[in-house]
Image: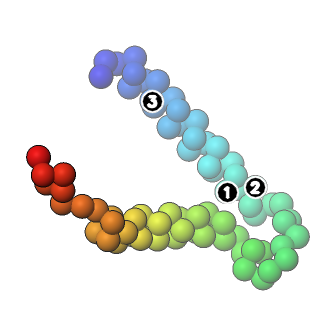
Amino acid sequence: MNDSHRSGNRFWVLLMTIGCVVVLLLDFVIDRHADAELEGWTGFYPVFGFVAIVLLILLSKILRRIVSRQEDFYGD
């Protein structure tokens, strides 16, 4: 990669980091009127999302072993 791609990537990473920090700070200020008690916890949705993605990745590895076929399945 040349330097223009790296500086462009740094810009987007910086922009996303700033956005995440702003949303995290707003989580302390905004009242969400949660229906369940867990929803009212600060940082519930980011933690829930992270755990869900980790479980999705782990389950996909297990599912791959179940549904995958041998390399020479078609007899090549």
Q: Secondary structure at mark 1?
A: helix
Front-most of 4 and 58?
A: 58
- For this orientation, the residue located farthest to the bottom is 37
Question: Alpha-carbon neighbours of circle 1 within 10 Å: few (<14), some, or many (≥20)?
Answer: some
Q: Which residue is mark 3?
A: 9
The x and y percentages for residue 65 are 28, 69
- Quadrant in which residue 24 is drawn: bottom right
The answer to whether the residue labelled 2 contacts the one labelled 1, judged by CB atoms less than 8 Å apart, is yes
The x and y percentages for residue 74 are 18, 51
Q: Which residue is mark 1?
A: 24
Disc sitting over residue 26 in the figure = 2
- Quadrant in which residue 5 is drawn: top left
Viewer-nearest of discs 3 and 1 = 3
Q: CA distance from mark 2 to mark 1?
A: 5 Å
The answer to whether the residue labelled 3 contacts the one labelled 1, judged by CB atoms less than 8 Å apart, is no
Q: Secondary structure at mark 2?
A: helix
41 sits left or right of 69 in the view: right
Q: Which residue corresponds to the image point at 84% horizontal and 73% vertical from the top-left?
A: 34
Q: Is residue 13 above or below residue 35?
A: above
Q: CA distance from mark 2 to mark 3?
A: 26 Å
- Label 3 amino acid? Asn
Question: Alpha-carbon neighbours of circle 2 within 10 Å: few (<14), some, or many (≥20)?
Answer: few
5 sits left or right of 53 in the view: left
User: If you read the primary sequence from the N terminus, does the residue marked by circle 3 or circle 1 appear first?
Assistant: 3
User: If you read the primary sequence from the N terminus, does the residue marked by circle 2 or circle 3 appear first?
Assistant: 3
- Label 1 amino acid? Leu
The x and y percentages for residue 20 are 62, 49
Viewer-nearest of discs 2 and 3 = 3
Q: Which residue corresponds to the image point at 52% horizontal and 70% vertical from the top-left?
A: 51
Q: Which residue corresponds to the image point at 86% horizontal and 65% vertical from the top-left?
A: 31
